[in-house]
Image (tube, grey):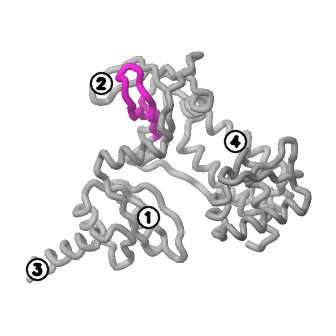
Amino acid sequence: MNRIDRVTAILIQLQSRKVVKAQDIAERFNISLRTVYRDVKTLEEAGIPVLGEAGVGYSIMDGYRLPPVMFTREEATAFLTAEKLIEKLADSSTDESYKSAMYKIRAVLRGTEKDFLENLDEHIQVYRSRRNRHATFEVNPIQTILKSIAGKNVISIKYFAQHSQEKTDRMVEPVGVFYLDGYWHLIAYCRLRKDYRDFRLDRMKDIRETDQLFDKAHPTLKAYMKEWMREMDLTQVIIRVDKKTLPYLEDQKYYSGFVSQKEVGDKIEMTFLTASLSGFAHWYLTFGNYAEIIQPVKLKEKVKESAKAILESLK
């Protein structure tokens, strides 16, 4: 990205939040803090009312608005891809809201980009995993939950507990939602159990936002999951695999605690949370000649031990 494009992108980022930290900008564009300061100064010299406070971050003066933004072809393609994902993986209310937003996005695209998306539309599809085909919603919970998190409203839900095969009425204080292995989950403080609980959204039979507000200081979802991981004694594993190998891992990675993946050069970096390094090592051996272990070092030792045991058994 050239400097002009980066400075423009920084301005858009500053308008996207009340306060943006310099470190966040540096990490997004992979630049130094000194470069961030220089780019922000460029915006100030151009007449942009940027406000900065040491130790807090940057913000744009209230009332300032950037003129209408044109999306790039790559950004428009990303929106289309997200639309396909939301259509299959979210509830109908969220899907309808996103489709409405997509009409607005398409409306500001240039004619060539509109034609581009029209031609591409039938060439992107998302299919549910066969083993998760029953993860459907009886209600539309996602928007209600997110609205309640923002407003700190207590949620009333009718929940079907799988272990007891019973329906229960719960009053919960929502913390956050996440998608894992084909299912949406809500982490919330349950007033009935007086503790935090994990509720599967597809097991909710009814949900509504109440007028009751809660003032309890709950942890962020990220902090809660980090503590949960520590209590579960899970180990984070990071590996990098050849792109050509990735399709062969799609149906298996979830059984090994798959969390996320991203491109790193010509490889795919995959992150897992596993309760058994030995078990992970055995799985890794099935494709290890097309991959490398980033962390932990102990996993490398486990793989060597497993490989040695296999060689000895062949003597």
Q: Quadrant of residue 247?
A: bottom left
Residue that appears at 28% across and 73% down: 300
Q: CA distance from mark 1 to mark 2?
A: 36 Å
Q: Quadrant of the N terminus?
A: bottom right
Q: Earlier in the sequence, mark 4 or mark 3?
A: 4
Residue to which mark 4 is pinned = 99
Residue to which mark 3 is pinned = 312
Q: CA distance from mark 3 to mark 1?
A: 30 Å
Residue that appears at 28% across and 68% down: 299
Residue 274 in the image: above or below residue 3: above
Dot 4 crowding, Cα within 10 Å, few <14, some 14–19, many 20+ = some
Residue 153 in the image: above or below residue 218: above
Q: Nearer the viewer, mark 1 or mark 4?
A: 1
Q: Position of residue 169 (x, y in %)?
A: 41, 17
Instruction: Check disc 2 and report its element: helix, strand or loop.
Output: loop
Q: Nearer the viewer, mark 2 or mark 3?
A: 3
Q: What are the residue bounds of the magenta stretch?
A: 184-203
Q: Position of residue 172 (x, y in %)?
A: 46, 24
The image's mark for residue 165 is: 2
Instruction: Check disc 4 and report its element: helix, strand or loop.
Output: helix
Give the left or right position of residue 43, taking residue 35 as reference. Answer: right
Q: Could you tell me the amino acid type at mark 4?
A: Lys
The image's mark for residue 270 is: 1
Check residue 242 for magenta coloring.
no
Q: CA distance from mark 4 to mark 3?
A: 58 Å
Q: Earlier in the sequence, mark 1 or mark 2?
A: 2
Give the left or right position of residue 17, taking residue 224 as reference. Answer: right
Residue 164 in the image: above or below residue 103: above
Q: Quadrant of residue 291?
A: bottom left
Q: Quadrant of residue 250?
A: bottom left
Q: CA distance from mark 1 to mark 4?
A: 30 Å
Q: Could you tell me the amino acid type at mark 3?
A: Glu
